[in-house]
Image (cartoon, rainbow, N blue to C red):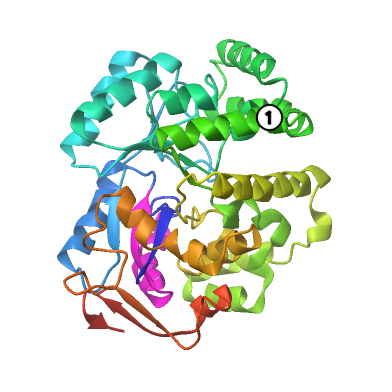
Amino acid sequence: PGLWDAHIHFAYIEELAPRMFDLFLLYGITSVRDTGGKIEFVTAWRDLARRSPTDAPRVMVAGPLIDGMPNVYDGSDPGHPPLSLGSGSVQAVAQLVERLDSFDVDFLKAYEMLTPEQFLKIMELAKAKGLKVTGHVPLSMDVIAASNAGLNSMEHMRNLELSCASTADQLLKERREILSKGKNLPGHELRSSIHTAQREVAVANYDDNKANAILEVLKKNDTWQIPTLALNTGQTRIPYGRPEWLESFEYLPDEIGNEWRQAAQLSPADVPQFRKDYTTWMLNMATKVHKAGIPMMAGTDTPIGFLTPGLSLHEELLVMVEAGMTPQEALKTATINPARYFKLENELGSIKEGYWADLVMLDANPLEDIRNTLKIVAVVKQGKVF
């Protein structure tokens, strides 16, 4: 079946967006899930895809990240483009949900600076409207509380490590104090200060029993995981330094391609030790999530992290296999699982009579070697052969 990338951002580099449709189809990606961007921008790409269903990937959108104040992606610098809208109250969050619903979004995305009260209001309204909510666990909450509130899926396993520490309760108390005192800081600085203060401490104090208890809750509540391992391991694996990755930069706008080639000169030897330790933690946790039977989807956060749209999904599948999945299990995270997430499993994600003809034709068997997903002969989008 055609492949999904379940975590992308058309708006992260707006100049790249016009190339992304073609890049996705080039690499066999026939459906995407955009997890944050200005509502008018992302719905324009969704509408274009709907008007040209045989020439573009299927697009599901959330609109802007729903964040608290100060919000993280506020447009204050190139690394934090305006992907989010900050809300200073529960009422403001409710108004934002209503506005997004009026644009017929496919799901909602909650973000890290929300208060528990704001987060609960999003869950309440989403349930009433039949919308799924994905997101990052707010820094003011722990993973169990967010899952119990109704969070349908977690992106990047973000902030999971903070709840898996033996000192998790103390870390939560400290986070709430930092958030209270830092309201006048830019959102990305405040968030970064918390991650800097707590992430390494949390990983050093990892408690397997606590982690297992959390995973049991995620399993019971059907809180899906989108680990974005291609992104989370990118600074240590540096896939964008490989020849096939450098070749993909030829398809990017010149200015972006040149910038990314400079990044490709990085060496794993330049990576700080904790980044390597955190990569190991991420891979081990992805293995535990899979063994716990928690549903997963493949997503990459492209084009963040110098991840070429389309090609990045193949890297995600490769890392999933390295984390313990069989090739078949990894393929499910990019085919039938996203279809199930959106309740489209009777139309997509399998090869059956009457289903949409989204197909990737390969020269070699990916069940024998997951890297064979890149041996693409043709791509079919709703019956049109490329």
Q: Is residue 210 magenta?
A: no
Q: Nearer the viewer, residue 79 or 128?
A: 128
Q: Residue at x 72, y 23 (%)?
A: 166
Q: From what the image shows, is residue 66 above or below residue 303?
A: above
Q: Position of residue 18 (x, y in %)?
A: 35, 65
Q: Residues within 10 Å of mark 1 (few under 14, many from 20)?
A: few
Q: From what the image shows, is residue 319 above or below residue 102?
A: below
Q: Nearer the viewer, residue 327 or 179?
A: 327
Tell me if I can see residue 73 in this picture: no
Q: Is residue 32 magenta?
A: yes
Q: Nearer the viewer, residue 244 or 253?
A: 244
Q: Quadrant of residue 189?
A: top right
Q: Position of residue 316 (x, y in %)?
A: 55, 61
Return the residue at label 1: 209
**Predominant SS along the magenta part:** helix
Is 85 placed left or right of 240 in the picture?
Answer: left
- Classify the position of the C terminus by image quarter: bottom left
Q: Position of residue 348 (x, y in %)?
A: 27, 63
Is 345 placed left or right of 295 in the picture?
Answer: left
Range of residues picked out in magenta:
14-34
Q: Residue at x 68, y 14 (%)?
A: 170
Q: Amino acid at mark 1?
A: Asn
Q: From what the image shows, is residue 230 above or below residue 81?
A: below
Q: Residue at x 65, y 27 (%)?
A: 210
Q: Nearer the viewer, residue 294 or 304?
A: 294
